Image (cartoon, rainbow, N blue to C red):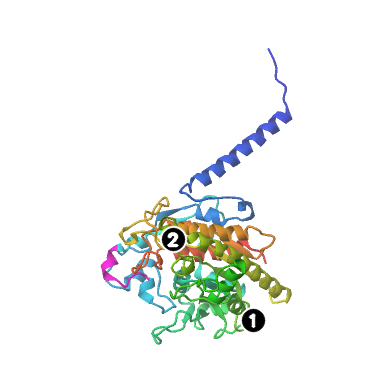
Amino acid sequence: MVVKRFSLRSVSTRIIFLGTSLSFLLFFYAYSSVSDGYNISFKDDNNYSCSPLAYSAGKWAFHPKSNASTFTSRDDALKFSGFDSCASSREFFWHLAADNQDQWSRFPAAHNWEWVPSRQCQGLRPFNAEQVVKDLVEQGGWFLVGDSVTENHFFSLSCLLYPHVLGSPNYTASPNFDRAWPQFLHLNPKSPLISRIAFPPGFDINTTPLVAFRRIDLLYSQQELIDIHRAAYPSTPKDFKLFSDEPVWTLPPSDYLANFTAPLPHGNYRTMVVSTAGHWTTTLFSGFRDEKKASKGYGIDRVLKLFNIAMKKWSDEVQSALRRNEISGAGKRRVLIRAYLPGHEDCHSHREPWTKIKSYSQNWYNWNNIKEFNNIFERVLSARIKYPDIIYLPIDRPARLRPDAHTTSDCLHIMTGAGVLEGWSHYIWHFVTRELVG
């Protein structure tokens, strides 16, 4: 009989092998769970208890918010979504997708879903409106920058935080609004939370916003982009016209960075949430449009090249501004880039979420290229040493799986209450209060 000798080395080797195999299986599970054409990378997961990708690698689960089943009036949208009301008055029932009676059959189905992150997402607390309000005062507010989809996000946040916040301006009293108007959420002086909040010195309930939204479609003014293009392509003919007359709302970074970094009592922001791409089209950037390239996005490749140049310059300028602000003793601030979201074709015919992202059959707007815009911004910010305070958040996948969650007027904007916009607020709150230090 042959007796095998006991070997610590062989046991250690087996343990290492089993550990490596288990790690591989966990990675394979996470990757396969989102195998819907997304370029998922878990390179930064070890740094976070619930990374943006781990959060996004989940699924929509059936979870009704109300026992009601019949939609009989516009106000039922609040009941189905679980909100008491909303602080913002801007296009109130449009944001709730309740402004068109012909589409009321979409309810309550559109509100009956909840996003469940992947198993790799650990430590994500349930959304707590009272704690969020407290954090926005004590740890600093949010400054939202983007187009009308970001405005959707702002409106949703005004519902999540109601009645503890007040919205302004009052669009009911001023119906002739300008999309360029800044919008704010302030702490409601009547909120019972006030006695439990540790207010920073200089905070004024009537003056200091908790959240602001600025409509900034391109992150630069049009003249700045003309100058950036001219510097990058100096041989461009002098009569070249970059932009069409298509309406656009945008500002220079110097303007909104000054708002973002304003000291108390006028500002107490610590996080700027940015999203852009929707208006980077060949109809706005008409100088690039080529009707002969219909199958290739009408010249969208030239728009993407300018976007790449502009976002590198923007990231340099913003990081420099954040560094100067911190050195001056004004405190640390950070910028989160939320991945932009394309729309869905024939969205109003859908009545439930997808389990897998589907390809487009048409070439609408720049939707087919949104992933390329997002990838450009992500690649720019992958230089973490260069841009330590600007972080890319790829949390767009939950929305990509919700063709049923759009407003009544189009298939790009997202309704409040369906869980998509609310998920953005939930994860951003987690990220800034749990994943970021300082």
Q: Which mark is residue 263?
A: 1
Q: Give, as a single range, the part of the protein colored magenta.
A: 96-105
Q: Which residue is mark 2?
A: 298
The vertical placement of 114 against 84, above or below, is above
What percent of the width, then of the height, locates residue 386? 69, 62
Number of numbered discs visible in the structure rendering? 2
Q: Is residue 127 visible?
A: no
Element carrying mark 2: loop
What percent of the width, then of the height, locates residue 262? 62, 80
Please tell me whether residue 98 belongs to the stretch shown in magenta: yes
User: Crowdedness of circle 1 by 10 Å Cα count: few (<14), some, many (20+)?
Assistant: some
What percent of the width, then of the height, locates residue 195? 57, 79
Query: Real-space Cα distance between discs 2 and 1?
Result: 45 Å
Seen in the image, is 364 located left or right of residue 335? left
Residue closer to the observer: 139 or 361: 361
Seen in the image, is 293 located left or right of residue 131? left
Of callouts 2 and 1, the N-terminal one: 1
Location of the N terminus (image quadrant): top right
For this orientation, the residue located farthest to the bottom is 173
Q: Which mark is residue 128?
A: none
The structure residue drawn at horizontal position 40% and vertical position 70%, both measured from the top left corner, is: 83
Residue closer to the observer: 218 or 187: 218
Looking at the rendered structure, the kind of residue marked 2 is Tyr
